[in-house]
Amino acid sequence: MHKQTVAQLMRGLRDKQFSSQELTSSLLQRIEQLDGQYNSFLTVSKDQALAMAKAADAQLASGNAGPLTGIPIAHKDVFCTQGVRTSCASRMLDNFIPPYDATVVRQLNEAGTVMLGKTNMDEFAMGSSNESSYYGAVSNPWGSTLVPGGSSGGSAAAIAAGLTPAATGTDTGGSIRQPAAFCGITGLKPTYGRVSRLGMVAYASSLDQAGPMARSAEDCALLLNAMAGHDPLDSTSAARAVPDYCADLNRPLEGLRIGLPKEYFGDGLDSTTAACIESALKELEQQGATLVEVSLAHANLTIPTYYIVAPAEASTNLSRFDGVRYGHRCDAPSDLDDLYTRSREEGFGDEVKLRILVGTYALSAGYYEAYYRKAQQARRLIKDDFMNSFQQVDIIAGPTTPGPAFALGSKNNDPVSMYLEDIYTLAVNLAGLPAMSLPAGLVEGKPVGLQLIGQHFDESRLLNVAHRFQQATNWHNLTPDSITGADL
Amino acid sequence: MPIDQDEIEKIAALARIRIKDEQLPGVTERLRNILAMMDTLQAADTEGVEPMANPLDAVQPLRADEVTEINRREAFQTIAPAVENGLYLVPKVIE
Amino acid sequence: MQWETVIGLEVHLQLATKSKIFSGSATTFGAEANTQASAVDLAMPGMLPVLNEQAVRYAVMFGLGIGAKIGRRSVFDRKNYFYPDLPKGYQISQFSDPIVGEGSFEIQLEDGSSRTIGITRAHLEEDAGKSLHEDFHDQTGIDLNRAGTPLLEIVSEPDIRSAEEAVAYLKALHSLVTYLEISDGNMAEGSMRCDINISLRPAGSTTLGTRAEIKNVNSFRFVEKAIQYEIERQSDILEDGGQIVQETRLYDADRNETRSMRSKEVANDYRYFPEPDLLPIVLDEDYIEALREALPELPREKRERFITQYELSPYDAGVLSAHRALADYFETTASKAGDAKIAANWVQGELLGRLNRDELEISDCPVPAENLAQLIQRILDNSISGKIAKQVFDAMWSGEGDADSIIEARGLKQVSDSGALEAMVDSVIADNQAQVEQYLAADENKRKKLVGFFVGQVMKLSKGQANPQMVNQLLAKKLV
């Protein structure tokens, strides 16, 4: 049961092979038994989960169930969940129990999903390895010394370990796609504005986007159907109808033009990873797609642009954590300044502090024009490159990451080399485009992710291509040998 | 010119982040590396390019002027570190 | 040396919306602490702002009211600083692209002259909460009910030259925004707060001196006093060869002085940048034109119309047009009474006098305009004298009813029946023979004075209700 996709579990629930309570209990038990080695969950909301499963079973019995009714899910700990601690993997919010749900959480609750708990992540979603969590690193089910990727590392690892069939994630610079690639699962970062940001603790407001993580493209489509939509309480949410993302999954790929950015297949790319990507592309070609070389001429601006925009926005988004209304407050502050600096000193980890400093610097008097404004201009150039490419092609494909999962601790002391891990994923966020990562092979037993990038609001096309690929290949069905728990 | 420790302390004060003395050299080095990476952007030709704040170049939607919120003070203050008589408490602010 | 004062004012105007600028919380004044602070206002994690359309409309109306350029595309920015009454650690404001651009308006001075004051810009922003320093054993209490109340910050050019002009400017601004009904303008409740930028320079100089900024002054009188104090302070320093420090000062009304705000010693670096949680406000021509057409008559237009239509003096027209409700009251009275000049006298004299005495607003006036009009009609049709009318007005003020019913109930109708008056005149003449003889012996000039005695006696006899004109005529006829 724990290896099944959401689509398979939906059928099992409908056919009464098992109840949601049985399914939920079995996963809760797996989490209890196995998660000690992964550290993928920060909070397991057992009682709520069982109550939700019970309600779901009643709905299934009454015949009023929606497609996702009774499906267990985990939420990245960046989404506020009413009554359930939402820590963002930070000491700052170690004690924070939100009195409200994020829109994404509410919508998935309304769709009947059963929340198992909250998953580990890089602190405030700042990181590419999940090592910046206040609650400790997450280990990759494909190898206990490997990082699961970040920042949605807990969600990806939990799915790969068979602890949940699906999870939510957020992606500011690759935080869904990179851990999906490292953990051999499928993840989708929707178009900016497609999914509400309300109740999702902000990292970089103009880049953040929530999306589904699961075992297949079909599952991502099912989840996105429940997650997407206009939220009048998020000004940047798109007021645009939501299509049925499952409707076009089987559309044939004949005539599909796939752009391959030459900048994504250059020096930085590990050669065995490149070989996996190339054979995946061959599969798509065999199904009738045409491969076309395109150029993203400003790709070299991506990393500096992102690492100006994101920390700048983050530096002020995180000003609200001041020890006054919620969250960590230092003991016996001597004065107001002490309250602020000591609460923040104690509450934030090193990477968060570093990014706050970088962002504060980039916005400070005398540097704004040279950094922030310049980055916003470069951002347009980066987006325009994509727009120009989309004149010639329907989607863009390439590697999700330069190589497979790296070892825990290997990049901790060099932030810039860590930032280079995101080289293929960052531009998508700068341009606001939808993109996916799906398993495309193994390198030395470690999963490799194929990245598909679509035009704004063309998630259906991405899901269609990914689904066709998964119908013809088995990579997404592979599970790490390390999974030992019995199917209860 | 690489950022110096004085400047880092000034930035840290603005951001209300305290850097312990023993951490300052390490932070300085990391920051210098990051800023050097950021500085590679200076070579880009962005002359005449309209800055892009939002990836969709969308415009602001407007909300009707209606009161939609109810008083939830109790729920909000349950999670507050220090409150008295419905007020949030901070160390004395002198003006 | 002769110094010229240069003043620019920044007015923070609370807009009269029902809900906050970025959340659906109520903006009602005086609610219990933090009961009108929503998750958005408290900057709870993950909360996002959504812009109130009414705040935008009001800002545009203000812009149109001062003939300013309206920003077709305006942008919100974050102004970053830490303060406990600022929950997000930044204020959402507008920096580089405000919603209202350059404009101007005219102010009237007491000597009857007028001046045009330039407006640099006006922009939308959110108000902060309040810090309460008392009663918390060395702690400060924070109330965030006010946080997120929409503000329009109106920035003037440094065109103001004296305390009198500053007050005239604020009064004109108050008049404009209450005409537009975009703010209640209630200074006591902080709906209109003023920062004063003030510097001195040698008369004739065209460069600006170093300025001090006096923060958050919240009444016309305090603005006047703070400026007067600051002019003294700065000229004393300059006369002694000293230099003005550019700083923020506070006006202490109890001591009538301004003093430096030492707590702001750290140089601010607000790190403005476009607010990524909000998108640019884009306004089209149709939207702006529709608001322009719907604008009410503004104070200046009304004043000019009063001068031409009712032949009022510029001063009277100014007083009567300063407040929209007062102007409406006057116009209703004038049209119903059929005599604008008498209506103007009554409104400016008796009515304003009593409102001031009882500290009432025109909206709380116990005498409806229709009743004052009826009273004036009774003067015009000689039913009562002006003197009796004041008694009737008193009675109306204390709620005894309308003019006619009071005149009726108290039997105040003027006696114009010539038979009755003749009988009274005869009786007065008969009873005062000594005075009659004195009168008859006097010359023409003296007679004019002496006749007053007989008029007085007749009025006394009639309890003030005799028609004085007729009494005079009868006396002239009989005293021969």
Image: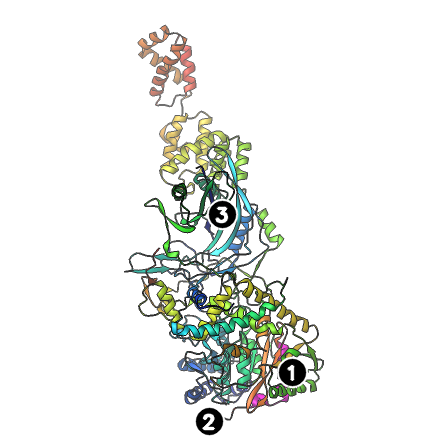
Which residue position holds label 3?
C181
Residue A128 x/y as whole percent:
51, 79
Residue type of the residue flagged with mark 3: Glu
Q: Chain of mark 1?
A: A
Mark 2 or mark 1: whose residue is earlier in sequence? 1
Distance from Cα at disc 1 to Cα at disc 3: 59 Å
The span shown in magenta is A460-479
Label at residue A250: 1
Residue A82 seen anywhere in this rendered image of the structure: no
Q: Secondary structure at mark 3?
A: loop
Disc 2: which chain? A
Residue A235 against residue C179 in the figure, above or below:
below
**Label of residue A170 in the image:** none
Q: Are marks 2 and 1 in contact (CB under 8 Å)?
A: no
Indicate the secondary structure of the residue bearing disc 1. loop
Q: Check disc 2 and give the amino acid type.
A: Ala
Residue under circle 2?
A: A486
Name the one closer to the observer, A102 or C269.
Answer: C269
How far across and down, in percent of the image, does residue A420 sit?
55, 78
Quarter of image, res C412: top left
C5 shown above or below A363: above
Point out residue C28 in the picture as x, y percentages from the top left corner. 41, 55
Chain ID, mark 3? C
Give the quarter of the figure containing the N terminus of chain C.
Answer: top left
Three-letter code, disc 1: Asn
Taking the magenta stretch, the answer to whether it contains residue A464 is yes
Q: Is residue C297 above or below residue A129?
A: above
**Within-10-Å neighbours for mark 3: few <14, some 14–19, many 20+:** some
Neighbor class of circle 2 (other Cα within 10 Å; few <14, some 14-19, many 20+) is few
Q: Left or right? Give the position of A401 relative to A314.
A: right
Q: Are marks 1 and 3 in contact (CB under 8 Å)?
A: no
